[in-house]
Amino acid sequence: MSAGTQAVAAEVLAQITQQPREMCARREVLLSDLGVDSLALREMVETLQDRLAIIVPDEVTARIQTVADLQNAVCRLAAAAPVSEPTIRA
């Protein structure tokens, strides 16, 4: 699992939810506990698709419940995509 991709997922989650990045990196946290509803999830997925040059299928999005689910999904999809390591924006 790419640490860079996990960091990008946490960064985007923190940006969308306005929650501390440390909380958004805790794998056991439910996205609903961070205030993520279906619209925020869609926005987050679209942002990650743009940042990581991946496509997240709707059936994958529907299974995302926790930070770990999000990180695992984007890491798996990013690993399969023919792209270089993502960069973390400050």
Image: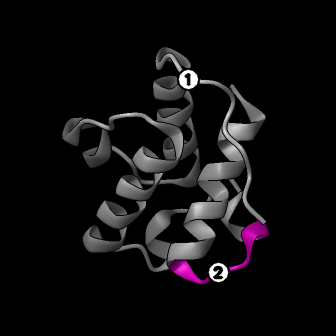
Q: Is residue 20 magenta?
A: yes
Residue 28 seen in the current view:
no
- Residue 29 located left or right of residue 38: right
Q: Which residues are magenta?
A: 17-22
- Specify the amino acid type for callout 1: Val
CA–CA distance between discs 2 and 1?
29 Å
Report the coloring of the rendering: one colour
Q: Which residue is mark 1?
A: 83
Up/down of 69 relative to 19, above or below: above
Quadrant of the rendered image containing residue 72: top right
Residue at position x 77%, y 36% in the image: 3
Q: Where does the image place residue 74, in percent across and percent down from the top left?
A: 50, 37
- Specify the amino acid type for callout 2: Gln
Q: Nearer the viewer, residue 2 or 26?
A: 2
Q: Nearer the viewer, residue 17 or 35?
A: 17
Quadrant of the rendered image containing residue 1: top right
Q: Residues within 10 Å of mark 1 (few under 14, many from 20)?
A: few
Which element carries disc 2, helix, strand or loop? Answer: loop
